Image (tube, grey):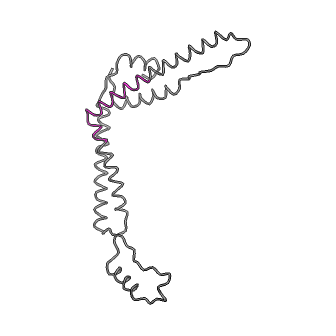
Amino acid sequence: MNINLRKANAIQSSIHDAINGIDITMSIEINEYQDPVKEIQEANNEMFANDARRMKLLQAFYNIRALVATANASCGISTNLAKAAFIEKRLQQLSSIASQKPVTDMQIIKGRLDKIKARDEKEYYGSRDTVSTSVVGSEQIAQAKAQIKDLRKQKQKINDENLDLNFKTEIPLSEDTVKVLTDEGIL
């Protein structure tokens, strides 16, 4: 049986939920009216049967995971994910530049510095002796914003391509995996 990568992801989530839903009880309460040997044996049998179910589901999960990883690498999804991660990090970097205020006009900076130089000692106490300004020019901010816009388009294109590849790319499930998943009501 073949399934696409999108379905494989959903199945992996269902397997994970099924594993978490299997009860593994390692102790019981026995009252004076019960046969302790029988009760302990039944609880032991149930616990190990449930553990066997967990093991089969875990095998199915990791078989699917390995097949998905191989398919992701061969169809280009892994490369696309790396590209998308790079773009996301670059967007974060550029956002700090794009959100800056532009450098203050040089005439204003020079005027403020001249004013600081010209003040006498009485005016100096408690006053700032520096001028603060951004170092990023308006054109640089505009360039950063343009790069952000372009990178977002590239990222959307990659995401669309991955979505398409997730539907088109299929992996083969073994008969054993299909049986386990069918028995557990996942398929």
User: Residue drawn 53% across and 26% down?
Assistant: 21
Image quarter where the N terminus lies is: top left
- Nearer to me, 95 or 45: 45
Does residue 69 lie above or below 40 as drawn? below
User: Residue drawn 28% across and 48% down?
Assistant: 154
Pinpoint residue 31: horizontal percent, then vertical percent: 72, 15
Pinpoint residue 97: horizontal percent, then vertical percent: 34, 62
Image quarter where the C terminus lies is: top left
Does residue 70 lie above or below 181 as drawn? below
State which region is magenta.
58-81
Number of numbered markers: 0
Determine whether, in the image, residue 170 is placed left or right of residue 16.
left
Pinpoint residue 71: horizontal percent, then vertical percent: 29, 30
Magenta highlight: main SS: helix
Q: Within the magenta stretch, is there residue 69?
A: yes
Most extreme residue toward the right is 32
User: Where on the picture, by quarter, is residue 93?
Assistant: bottom left
User: Where on the picture, by quarter, is residue 131?
Assistant: bottom left
Pinpoint residue 86: horizontal percent, then vertical percent: 31, 48
- Nearer to me, 93 or 138: 93
User: Where on the picture, by quarter, is residue 75?
Assistant: top left
